[in-house]
Image: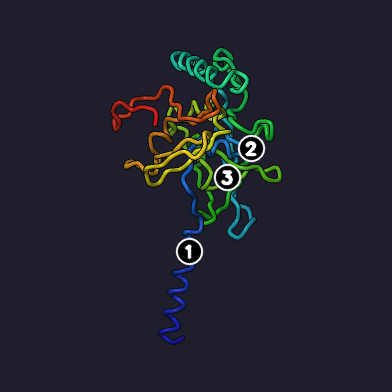
């Protein structure tokens, strides 16, 4: 092989490797948007995994254990009641589709599934590409609890890097409350990403998501603490409720 041909082959190999590593590209999404666009949303711990020969690089199949719903007590219950009153005033109890705070605070043996119970009441296996370049997700076995969002295809649950997959202990209190009932209220709303301000809504069912334009970036304050909820008049707006104080923001108000 001539020196110049060897250089061409080397550059070509490097180029293919580079593009292969960059093959999976996902735009950031607000957790509510990921929730509403998913077939299934669950809280689970990974208890096993195996690699099978499916697809170009194989498929990882994770065995999971869904976590059970736990009682909700104390101040969280009182705040939930206040949230329900606010949401019922704006949207009407028929639109909310929520249980009362008393029912929500009762112990339950049902798996903690936030979306997709009617499609698949119990999930035991999660499928993902083995290669991260094809958006495969790497999960730790017997180490963390995860929030998993994914799609159902041919009776199987699939997740990828473009789905919202997060360690449960990394979620804020507002995000956990959003999973329980707030995000449901906003699935008819549209979250519009703002990259360069100023940004404006183009229809009344939009909320402008400014985390990508803010100096602290993604995930920002709206991602961590807000839900976009339809109001009684039909327009959508950001709703926060209660959240722990953020030391980086003083006198924070609704965006």
Q: Position of residue 34 (x, y in %)?
A: 53, 39
Q: Position of residue 25 (x, y in %)?
A: 49, 54
- What residue occupies the far bottom of the structure in this picture? 2
Q: Position of residue 7 (x, y in %)?
A: 42, 79
Seen at 57% across and 25% down, the residue is 68
Q: Position of residue 130 (x, y in %)?
A: 56, 53
Which quarter of the figure is the C terminus placed in? top left
- Distance, label 2 to label 3, CA atoms, is 13 Å
Left or right side of 16 for 244: left
**203 or 133: which is nearer to us?**
203
**Considering the numbered disc 3 on the image, is that residue within a helix, a strand or a loop?**
loop
Residue linked to disc 3: 159
Depicted 11 relative to depicted 18: above or below: below
**Considering the numbered disc 2 on the image, is that residue within a helix, a strand or a loop?**
loop
Residue 131 showing in the rendered view: yes
First of labels 3, 1 by sequence position: 1
Foreground label between 2 and 1: 1
Q: Give the crowd class for mark 3: few <14, some 14-19, many >=20 residues within 10 Å.
A: many
Residue linked to disc 2: 124
Foreground label between 2 and 3: 3
Left or right side of 209 for 252: left
Residue linked to disc 1: 19
- Distance, label 2 to label 1, CA atoms, is 34 Å
Seen at 33% across and 28% down, the residue is 252
Find residue 158 and report its image quarter.
top right
Depicted 189 relative to depicted 102: above or below: below
């Amino acid at each position: 092989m001539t020196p110049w041909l060897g250089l061409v082959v080397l550059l070509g190999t490097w180029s293919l490797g580079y593009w292969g590593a960059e093959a999976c590209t996902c735009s950031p999404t607000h957790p509510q948007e990921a929730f509403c666009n998913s077939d299934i949303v669950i809280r689970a711990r990974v208890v096993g995994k195996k690699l099978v020969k499916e697809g170009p690089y194989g498929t990882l199949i994770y065995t999971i254990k869904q976590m059970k719903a736990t009682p909700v007590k104390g101040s969280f219950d009182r705040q939930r009641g206040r949230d329900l009153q606010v949401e019922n005033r704006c949207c009407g109890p028929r639109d909310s589709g929520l249980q009362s705070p008393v029912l929500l605070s009762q112990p339950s043996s049902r798996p903690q599934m936030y979306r997709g119970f009617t499609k698949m009441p119990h999930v035991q296996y999660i499928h993902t590409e083995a290669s991260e370049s094809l958006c495969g997700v790497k999960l730790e076995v017997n180490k963390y609890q995860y929030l998993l969002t994914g799609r159902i295809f041919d009776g199987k649950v699939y997740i990828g890097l473009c789905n919202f997959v997060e360690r449960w202990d990394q979620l804020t209190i507002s995000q956990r409350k959003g999973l329980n009932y707030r995000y449901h209220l906003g699935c008819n709303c549209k979250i519009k990403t703002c990259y360069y301000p100023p940004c404006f809504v183009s229809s009344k069912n939009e909320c402008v998501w400014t985390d990508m334009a803010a100096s602290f970036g993604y995930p920002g304050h709206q991602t961590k603490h807000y839900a976009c909820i339809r109001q009684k008049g039909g327009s959508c707006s950001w709703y926060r409720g209660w959240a722990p104080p953020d030391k980086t923001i003083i006198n924070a108000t609704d965006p």
